[in-house]
Image (cartoon, rainbow, N blue to C red):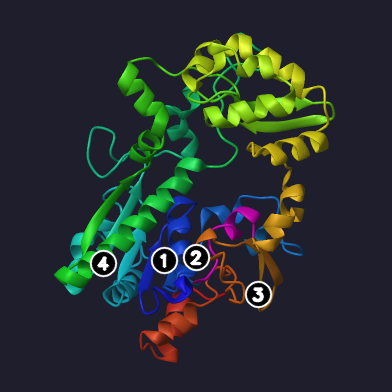
């Protein structure tokens, strides 16, 4: 099973917010041992990004819904590495690690002797991955920025939202931090590739992941459309720039998504919808023709869709083999029979806080019996981790009393 594929791999997680923790949660889900380094003063920023908080907890407990989404399966040590004694402990942990993931501004960790150059001296096999806003070099290196900034800078918001001249027109961001999430996935892939390469070379490397790079890359077909045509994509609401009809349509009792991706599907849709005249019209016979003549096609399709209920359309479209989808709220999502069947809602039992509800990693959808480690409290495993380094009880107590380490 994939769940054990990274067993024996040790990951030191010096990242915060979403992109880095999303990456390290993937690694934890795949069996890696992940140690999360947190600031004793508050911990990961997202601990305070609420409400909501886990039931029966408060902001002080640090279990916001946001924090929970990306920190499953890790152990936490809260340590002040601005103190030389704290930095020394982090270096010891890095000396035993296979991977270090961090998302500080370039040069920040170097000030504490925790940059890649210093860490690899004691561990030449170390794989180091830095996630930054703009990369470790270039005219904007070192400038801070969150996901929202890169949705704008990378182009996504320029073509996302209602068309100009329509109600609500203007740039729109996505409902979740997609640049962070994609950066976390690119980071995961890079680390897995580096582990494979290290098995051959015996040495590690430093990997540079920039949110701006990811934001540009994830434009995908929109970027390629522009590079091929030299035409700047415009906001077109819920329509698709390359397929038609591929949009949200009103039914008699709500909305659904009609997603016609090829000419055969369009022919079947027309037959099922009683629109045989469209199927026979050369202006709509091919996808390219439908895109060119979409302003005339869409109102006819919209009128037909509005004539029946969503339940009727679901039956008709399923029988015709035409892709469609509901627009579910999240309560609908987690009640959906297929989502339930796939086991996408999971739970973990925290030793003091009780049940923590979470979402299954899609990589592990076939692994239904696995137990999950809940996200950790800040510094929950500080003593355990320090003991694992061989520190005696009095040494640990001294670090805690000095304020270098916080024990949850």
N-term-proximal mark, 1 vs 4:
1
Element type where label 1 sits in the image: loop
Determine which residue is flagged by label 3: 350
Residue sitting nearer the eye, 333 or 408: 333
Residue sitting nearer the eye, 372 or 129: 372
Task: Answer with left or right where residue 322 lies relative to residue 194.
Answer: right
Q: Are marks 2 and 1 in contact (CB under 8 Å)?
A: yes
Residue sitting nearer the eye, 401 or 56: 56
Q: Position of residue 301 (x, y in %)?
A: 69, 19
Q: Position of residue 177 (x, y in %)?
A: 52, 42
- Cα separation, mark 3 vs mark 1, equals 25 Å
Neighbor class of circle 1 (other Cα within 10 Å; few <14, some 14-19, many 20+) is many
> Where 160 sits versus 125, above or below?
above
Question: Image quarter for residue 375?
Answer: bottom right
Determine which residue is flagged by label 1: 80
Determine which residue is flagged by label 2: 40
Query: Of circles 3 and 2, which is in front?
Result: 3
- Magenta region: which residues? 63-74
- Cα separation, mark 1 vs mark 4, equals 33 Å
């Amino acid at each position: 099973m994939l769940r054990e594929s990274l067993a024996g791999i040790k990951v030191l997680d010096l990242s915060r917010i979403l992109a880095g923790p999303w990456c390290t949660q993937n690694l934890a889900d795949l069996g890696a041992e992940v140690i999360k380094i947190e600031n004793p003063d508050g911990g990961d920023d997202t601990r305070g990004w609420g409400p909501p908080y886990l039931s029966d907890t408060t902001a002080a407990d640090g279990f916001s819904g946001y924090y929970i989404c990306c920190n499953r399966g890790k152990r936490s040590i809260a340590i002040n590495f601005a103190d030389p004694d704290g930095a020394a402990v982090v270096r010891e942990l890095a000396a035993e690690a296979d991977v270090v993931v961090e998302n500080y501004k370039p040069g920040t960790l170097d000030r504490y002797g925790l940059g890649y150059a210093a860490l690899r001296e004691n561990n030449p096999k170390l794989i180091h991955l830095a996630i930054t806003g703009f990369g470790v070099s270039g005219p904007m290196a070192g400038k801070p920025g969150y996901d929202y900034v890169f949705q704008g800078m990378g182009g996504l918001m320029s073509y996302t939202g209602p068309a100009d001249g329509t109600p609500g027109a203007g740039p729109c961001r996505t409902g979740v931090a997609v640049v962070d999430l994609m950066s976390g996935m690119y980071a995961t892939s890079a680390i897995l590739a580096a582990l494979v390469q290290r098995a051959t070379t015996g040495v590690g490397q430093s990997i540079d992941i920039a949110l701006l790079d990811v934001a540009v890359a994830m434009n995908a077909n929109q970027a390629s459309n522009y590079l091929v045509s030299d035409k700047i994509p415009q906001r077109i609401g819920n329509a698709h720039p390359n397929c038609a009809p591929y949009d949200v349509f009103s039914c008699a009792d709500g909305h659904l998504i009609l997603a016609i991706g090829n000419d055969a599907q369009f022919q079947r849709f027309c037959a099922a919808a009683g629109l045989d005249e469209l199927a026979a019209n050369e202006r709509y016979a091919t996808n390219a023709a439908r895109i060119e003549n979409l302003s005339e096609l869409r109102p006819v399709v919209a009128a037909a869709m509005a004539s029946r209920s969503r339940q009727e359309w679901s039956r008709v479209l399923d029988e015709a083999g035409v892709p469609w989808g509901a627009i579910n709220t999240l309560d609908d999502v987690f009640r959906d029979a297929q989502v339930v069947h796939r086991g996408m809602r999971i739970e973990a039992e925290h030793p003091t806080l009780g049940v923590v509800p979470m979402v299954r990693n899609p990589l592990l959808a076939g692994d239904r019996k696995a137990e999950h480690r809940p996200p950790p409290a800040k510094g929950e495993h500080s003593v355990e981790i320090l003991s694992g380094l061989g520190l005696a009880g009095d040494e640990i107590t001294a670090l805690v009393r000095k304020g270098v380490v916080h024990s949850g």
